[in-house]
Amino acid sequence: MEHELHNEQIKITIRDGQLSGLLYGGRQWMHNPADPGWGHSDAEMFPIIGPTAEVAYRVQVPRGNALMDQHGFLRDMPYELLESGKKLKLGKEYPAGTPVANPKFPDRSTLRMHLWPYSCSISKTFKIQGDTVRVDFEISGERDMPYMLGYHPAFALKTPDARIIARDQTYSITEIMAAGNRALQVADCSEVTLEDQGKLHLRATGFRHFMLWSPDPGMVCIEPVTFYPYDAGQSKLHEGFDFLTDGPVNFSLELRPEA
């Protein structure tokens, strides 16, 4: 499933729910999964963020233990098309207790199936507003359902001097790579800028922090998250949950390229 949205300035491509292209002024900002580094251009982390192998893939929730591999099951479910036109809206529905196959099994994980004891749904909407691309998420589900949310877009780098600026702090790709799979936390932050043959400004709403991750000098992931899991440890992952109340919760990431 592939869709395109564009105006006079920007063209975006969405392939199987992933933001696979963001073209502005001849510059492609999104990472190509066929290039070295990571095999995706974006993904979601839901309903948990972080690894779970050290605790036998069990995550403590009010209804007992959920079975979740790293970053949850959402990325392992296909999106359905809900709306197309000037914007593209996609969605996923999860009935409580439904097994979701773990594609990491058996080569990279001993967990065969994800299991979550709550029913929920999530929508992902893409739209272009002038010189800005906006990605919106809406989560609905049972009252008091615990959740975390992270958005995991990957960006292509053109120079070895690429850097990320957050407030008055600058992060080099070398520094980000040195953090390894823990990812580097930018705490209590809603806006960052990637500088690399132009600028890409990112502004998050609803999230609390950013995580920066780079497995290869040709790419970097800039990930708004509700919770940074690596300080808590896997046995205390549940301490990072938020909880649904009476209605849906909303999150967004705006991406504004600049020549």
Image (cartoon, rainbow, N blue to C red):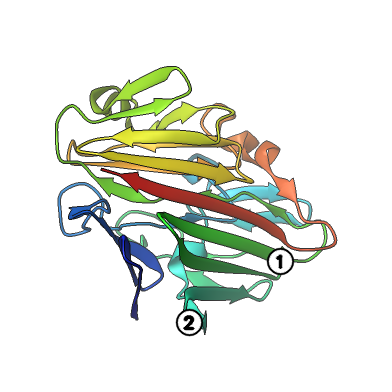
Circle 2 or circle 1, nearest the eye:
2
Residue 217 picture quarter: top left
| Residue on which the image places disc 2 | 84
Q: Say whether marks 2 and 1 touch (CB < 8 Å).
A: no
SS assignment at label 2: loop
> Which amino acid does the dot numbered 2 rest on?
Ser
Q: Nearer the viewer, residue 206 or 74?
A: 206
Give the side of residue 88 with respect to residue 206, left or right.
left
Q: Does residue 216 appear in the picture of this structure?
A: yes
The image's mark for residue 8 is none
Q: Nearer the viewer, residue 39 or 153?
A: 153
Instruction: Of the two numbered discs 2 and 1 on the same chain, state the one appearing first in sequence.
Output: 2
Residue at (39% x, 34% y) in the render: 193
Percent position of residue 250, x then y:
66, 57
> Which amino acid does the dot numbered 1 rest on?
Ser
Q: Nearer the viewer, residue 27 or 102?
A: 27
SS assignment at label 1: strand
Percent position of residue 219, x then y:
23, 42
Give the side of residue 13 with respect to residue 43, left or right.
left
Residue 165 picture quarter: top left
Q: Does residue 70 appear in the picture of this structure?
A: no
| Residue on which the image places disc 1 | 140
Question: Counting other residues with Cα less than 10 Å from the Cα at mark 1, is it few (<14), some (14-19), or many (20 or more)?
Answer: some
Residue situated furthest top in the rendering: 168
Percent position of residue 38, x then y:
26, 50
Give the side of residue 164 with respect to residue 226, left or right.
left
- How far apart are the two marked residues, 2 and 1, measured between alpha carbons? 21 Å
Q: Nearer the viewer, residue 119 or 177?
A: 177
Residue at (45% x, 75% y) in the render: 78
Question: Counting other residues with Cα less than 10 Å from the Cα at mark 2, is it few (<14), some (14-19), or many (20 or more)?
Answer: some
Q: Is residue 155 above or below residue 110?
A: above
Residue at (27% x, 54% y) in the render: 30
